């Protein structure tokens, strides 16, 4: 299945072309995230966690090398296809919007289940 691409509008109205991160590139961070998550299984389902547990989980991800900054560092430079864009020029909400799409969090970026191979 080809890697999806999308044009994302920035706060100043300019647009950048972004592609999703490949499964191979995601694997390292996803493996770390799964390991950290297993350490939190005894705390129940994430949607039931209190704010302290969410913060503890986020800190554990950061310490393990799989937090938000690690994802930005590992994926965004390669996934932003547009030329002449410095990641340091993006505002934090722009970074999060791009990262969310690159990861496949957003419905338009998710791979349709009926296209997955068994």
Image: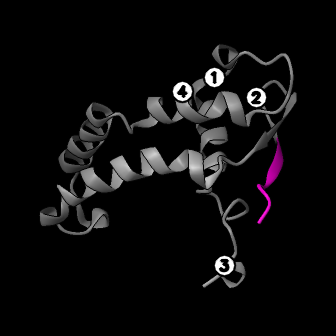
Label 2 Cα crowd, 10 Å radius (few <14 / some 14-19 / many 20+): few
Q: CA distance from mark 1 to mark 4?
A: 15 Å
Q: Position of residue 71 (x, y in %)?
A: 50, 36
Give the alpha-carbon distance from disc 2 to disc 3, as whole Å. 34 Å
Quadrant in the rendering for residue 39: bottom left
Identify the disc placed on residue 73: 4
Residue 91, numbered label: 1
User: Observer-nearest residue: 5 or 57?
Assistant: 5
- What residue appears at the point 65 percent right and 81 percent down from the top-left corner? 117
> Where is 61 relative to 11, above or below?
below
For marks 1 and 2 on the same chain, the one whose residue lies earlier in the sequence: 2
Residue identified by numbered label 3: 116
Which of the colour schemes (rainbow, by chain, secondary structure, one colour) is used?
one colour
Q: Quadrant of the N terminus?
A: bottom right
Q: Position of residue 19 (x, y in %)?
A: 76, 45
The quarter of the picture where the C terminus appears is: bottom right
Q: Looking at the picture, how far across and down is residue 7, in whole percent?
A: 85, 43
Q: Residue at x 46, y 29 (%)?
A: 69
* First in sequence: mark 2 vs mark 3: 2
**Residue 68 at x, y = what percent?**
45, 35
**Which stretch appears magenta?**
1-7
């Amino acid at each position: 299945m080809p890697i999806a691409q999308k044009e994302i509008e920035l706060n100043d109205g300019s647009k950048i072309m972004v592609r999703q991160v490949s499964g191979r590139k995601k694997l390292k961070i996803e493996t770390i995230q799964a390991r950290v998550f297993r350490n939190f299984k005894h705390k129940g389902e994430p949607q039931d966690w209190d704010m302290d547990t969410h913060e503890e989980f986020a800190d554990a991800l950061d310490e393990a090398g799989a937090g938000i900054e690690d994802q930005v560092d590992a994926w965004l430079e390669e996934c932003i296809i547009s030329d002449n864009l410095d990641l340091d020029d993006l505002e934090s909400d722009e970074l999060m919007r791009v990262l969310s799409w690159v990861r496949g969090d957003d419905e338009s970026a998710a791979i349709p289940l009926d296209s997955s191979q068994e």
